[in-house]
Amino acid sequence: MGAVYSQLSITERRKIERWRHAKVPVDEMARVLKRCRSTIFRELKRNHFRDESMPKCDGYFGAAAQLMTADRRARQRKLIKHPELVKRVAERLKNGWTPEQISNRMIHERAVPGVCQETIYRYIYSKEGQLDDLWWYLPTHCVVRRPRRTRRRREPKFHRDVSLLFRPDDVAHRRQFGHWEAGLMLFKQKLGQTNVTSMVERISRFTVIL
């Protein structure tokens, strides 16, 4: 086994099923699969198939074991165990919140139970989340989550010296009148050349939209 534990795959479970029917020793299964023998024993015990209506079909089956594991992991997920939490997250997603904003807001509100952004993303792209098309409310509108190796953090577009974090104290704490915050919204070219510029005075909140 490696330093990081990984779940048994459907291919490994099908091999275990065939070997089980052939009465191959567990030690031999573990050696071929390069797994700990306790992993095989635990797999055979936890995913043993039983059905009172079919007493002759009692045993270990790879496909059934895969379904039982997936169902058990789904029940253990926080957003599956707490329906009210799912409802709250879905409402905020539909209102334009990102998973990062939702999780950070829950930390600020000290919500119990809380949820991290990774849990929200996993739920959105899970079987349950796909039924509600929650992926549509993400800024990227990606129906399939991108592989982890492609989700690299981009370099900042602005130098740290012009960051909002380094504003003068009088500006940051709104002590002087006459400091403005501006924003520019650029639309797709097919919608024309009209864009929107907004300017807000930091003390009075007087707003100019062009």
Image: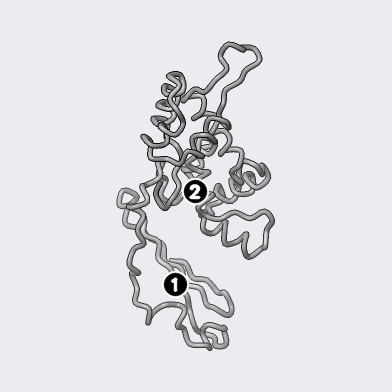
Residue occupied by mark 2: 121
Asked if residue 160 is positioned above or below residue 11 in the image, the reply reads below
| Image point (53%, 30%), residue name | 44
Residue density around tag 2, few if under 14, some if 14–19, many if 20 or more, within 10 Å: some
Name the amino acid, label 2.
Answer: Tyr
Q: Is residue 148 visible?
A: yes
Quarter of the image with the C terminus in it? bottom left
Which residue does the numbered mark 1 point to in the structure image?
182
Mark carried by residue 1: none
Q: Observer-nearest residue: 143 or 199?
A: 143
Query: Tag 1: Cα neighbours inside 10 Å, few (<14), some, or many (≥20)?
Result: few
**Label 2 secondary element:** helix
Give the distance between the C-alpha atoms of the residues marked 1 and 2, in whole angstroms.
Answer: 32 Å
Image depth: mark 1 or mark 2 in front: 2
Q: Residue at x 61, y 20 (%)?
A: 50
- In the visual, does 39 lie left or right of 83? left
- Nearest the eye: 71 or 9: 9
> Going by the image, does 50 lie left or right of 36?
right
* In the depicted structure, whether residue 150 falls above or below residue 33: below
User: Which tag, 1 or 2, sits closer to the chain's start?
Assistant: 2
> What amino acid is at disc 1?
Ala
Locate residue 100, reporting x and y percent: 51, 58
- Residue 98 percent location from the top left of the image: 51, 54
Residue 150 position within the rendered picture, expressed as x and y whole percent measured from the top left: 32, 52
Residue at the (41%, 53%) spot, across then down: 3
